[in-house]
Amino acid sequence: MPEDKPKKSEIDRLKELVRKSGFPLQIEIASRLYSARTKRNLKEMEVSTGMYYLDKDENKGRELDITARIPIQYNRILEGKSLGLTGIDLSLLIQCKRMPGNAWVFFKTSQEIFSAPLCTSVLDTLDWTPRSHWEFAFLLGLHYEGVIKTTLYDEYVLDESRSNKKVENLFEAVITLAKAVSYRLDTTTESLRSTLVRFANVPDYAVSCVNLCYPVVVFDGKMYLAEETGLYGEMNPVPIDHVCLFFDFVSGNYRPIQFYVDIVQREAFDRFFDKVANDVEILKKALEGSAGIKFRKEVAKALSSHRMKEAGILK
C-alpha cells in the first residue's frame, strides 16, 4: 500500500518555516557574491558558506554564514620573470540576520571614531616592530571613511508575527563575528609560525602577505539612525542602510579585541560591495607602491633577524 502523500498544510508549514529562517538570505547574499566575481572583475574571489570556527567559551565548533576571500596581488621579478604574488588576503566574514519585524536603531554620538579593519602578518608572528602592515589598514580612501560610525545601538520588535521576538539578534551576530575573527587571526598566526618552523629557508616573498578582515552583518529588517533633537533625551530616527559599529569584545577565553563591523541592510549589499571592490583597487595600488615596498623590506629584515637568533648568532 503506497505511503500517504504529505498533507498540503504540512508543505505550506514547512515553506513558512524555511522562509522565516536565515537560509534564504544566506543563499541570496552568497549568490550576489558569486555574481560579483564577474561584474567586479574579482575572478580570484573564493566564496564559501558554513565556515567553522572554534568557540572557546563553549569549547565547540560553530558555523559562520559566509566567507569571501579576495587575494590581492602585486608583481615581482623572480629569476628574470614577472610573477603575480599574493600580497593581501582580504576576507569578508559575513553573518546574516533575517528579522523583518525587528528594527535596529543606532545612536549618533559626538565621539570621534577612526575605523580600520583588523590586520595581521608574519611581523606579528615574529613580534617584529614596526608593524608596517598596519599601514594598509589606515589607507586613505577605504570605505570606512564615508560611513556613519557609532558605538551605541538597540533592537526593538515592531511586528511580532515577523520576528523571533528576541532583541539580542544584533548582539549575537556581533559576538559571533568577534569569535570568528579571533579564530581567523589566531589560525593565521599559527600557520605562519608552523611554516617558519617546517621550512627553515622559506623565502621572504612566500610569507609577505597581509591578512585583512572585514566583519559584516547583513540584516533583512529595518535600520534607523537616532539623531538628537533640541529637546534633551529626544531622538529623531531616520532610515539608514549602512553603519559602522565599533565593538570592544572582552571574554575570559579570548584576548580583548576592538573591531569595526559593517552593518548593512539587505537591499544595500550590492552598493556596499561596490565600496569593497573599490577598496581592493586602493589596496592593490598600495601593494605596488611605497607601503608595499616598505612592508616587504620589513619582512626580509625580520626573517633575517629570526634566522640569526635561531642559529645563535643574535640573542
Image (tube, rainbow, N blue to C red):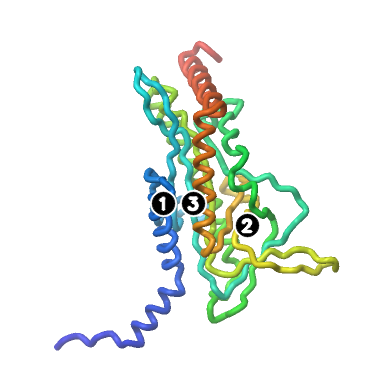
Residue that appears at 43% across and 46% down: 69
Residue type highlighted by circle 3: Leu
The quarter of the picture where the N terminus appears is bottom left
> Residue 170: horizontal and vertical position, in percent?
59, 63
Give the quarter of the figure containing the C terminus.
top right
Label 1 or label 3, whichever lies nearer to me, is 1
Q: What's the amino acid at mark 2?
A: Val
Which residue is rendered at x = 57% and y = 46% of the image?
Answer: 254
- Which is nearer the N-term, disc 3 or disc 2? 3
- Within-10-Å neighbours for mark 1: few <14, some 14–19, many 20+: few
Can you tell which mark lies on residue 93? 3
Q: Residue at x 69, y 67 (%)?
A: 238
Residue 196 is situated, as x and y percent measured from the top left of the image, at: 42, 26
Q: Say left or right for 276 vs 245.
A: left
Q: Provide the secondary structure element on which disc 1 rests.
A: helix
Residue bearing the label numbered 2: 243
Q: Which residue is mark 1?
A: 39
Q: First in sequence, mark 1 or 3: give its number.
A: 1
Q: Is residue 227 left or right of residue 180?
A: right
Amino acid beneath label 1 = Lys
Q: Is residue 128 visible?
A: yes
- As displayed, is residue 226 above or below residue 6? above
